[in-house]
Amino acid sequence: MSKISLDRILQSQGFGSRKYCRALIEDGGVAIGGEILTSYKTLVETDGLVLTVFDEEWTYREHVYIALYKPAGYECSRKPSHHPGVLTLLPEQFTWREVQPVGRLDHDTTGMLLMSDDGAFIHAQSSPKRHVPKVYQATTAEPVTQELVDQLLAGVQLHDEPAPLAAVTCIKRGEHQLEIVLEQGKYHQVKRMLAAAGNHCTALHRSQIGALTLESLMIKEGEWCYLEPPLLALLVPAS
C-alpha cells in the first residue's frame, strides 16, 4: 500500500478540512506510535495505521461499515426535517467522511441500521436483486389471525406496485405480535402490507439483516459498532 501525506490521511478519516487538519498536525495534536508529528507533509503507510488524535486512538479505515441500533425518534437522513438524524448518534468524524444509511427505517422504527461511506457497498446492499432477508418484529393494532398470516405469505397488492408482495416467512409470536421476513425493502413495506391485509402496525423493530443479528452485536439502543470482515460476510445472501 502506498504512503499518503498525514494531512490527507486525517482528512480521509473525517477530522475536518485539509486546512484544519494541517493546523491540527502543526499544533502537535497528532501522534503515531507515541511520536508527535508536526509536519503535515510526512508520508505515512496506512496499512495497520493507528493514529492518536486529541489523545484518542483511531484505526485508519479506507471505508467504514457500521451497524447502529436505531432508537425511535430519529430520521435516516443526512438532512432530517422533523426529527434528529441518525448521524447525531455517531462521532462527528463520520459526518465529515459522508457516512450514510443503507436504506431507511421510519423515524418510529427501531433496530438494526447499516451505515457506510462505501458507495459500492451501499448500492449492493440496497439492490433488490441481492435478495438479502430482513427480519422484523411487528406489533399490530388488531389480533394476529391465521388469515392475516396466510395473506402476508400469499402476497398483498400495494398501491403503485405492479405485482403483489409476499413475505418470505411470517410467524405469529403473540396475540398482537408478528415476525415477518422480507427481501424487497420497499417504502414502508411492512406497515403497508399489514394495512393492505386489514390490520395496522403500531410498532416495528428490525432484528436481523442476512445472517447478522442485532443480538449477536451486543449493542444497546442508540449504540453502534464497526462491522469487520467476518460480520460483513454475514450480510451476503446464502447461495
Image (cartoon, helix red, strand yellow):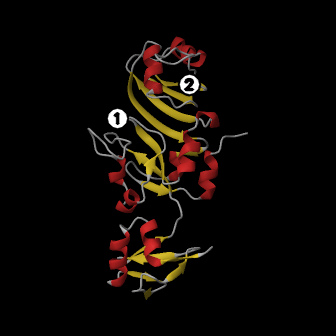
Q: Residue at label 1?
A: 108
Observer-nearest of 61 and 179: 61
Where disc 2 sits, the SS reads strand
Vertical relation: 16 (above or below) 114: below
Q: What crowding class fits label 2: few (fewer than 14 Cα within 10 Å), some (14-19), or many (20 or more)?
A: some
Give the tally of numbered discs.
Answer: 2
Q: Of the residues shown, which amino acid type is indicated by label 1?
A: Asp
In the rendered image, residue 209, in percent from the top left (x then y), is placed at: 56, 41
Q: Earlier in the sequence, mark 2 or mark 1?
A: 1
Q: Residue at label 2?
A: 171
Question: Is 126 left or right of 224, judged from the image as shown?
Answer: right
The answer to whether residue 28 is visible is: no
Q: What crowding class fits label 1: few (fewer than 14 Cα within 10 Å), some (14-19), or many (20 or more)?
A: some
**Label at residue 29:** none
Vertical relation: 57 (above or below) 108: below
Q: Disc 2 or disc 1, which is closer to the eye? A: 1
The answer to whether residue 85 is visible is: yes
Question: Is the N terminus in the top left, top right, bottom left or bottom right quadrant?
Answer: bottom right
Question: Is the C terminus in the top left, top right, bottom left or bottom right quadrant?
Answer: top right
- Which residue is found at the position 50% from the left and 70% from the top? 59
Residue at the limit of the structure toward the bottom, as seen here:
35
Where disc 1 sits, the SS reads loop
Residue at the limit of the structure toward the left, as seen here:
82
In the rendered image, residue 32, in percent from the top left (x then y), is placed at: 47, 82
- Which residue is found at the position 44% from the left and 53% from the top? 99
Observer-nearest of 178 and 38: 38
Question: Is 102 left or right of 53, judged from the image as shown?
Answer: right
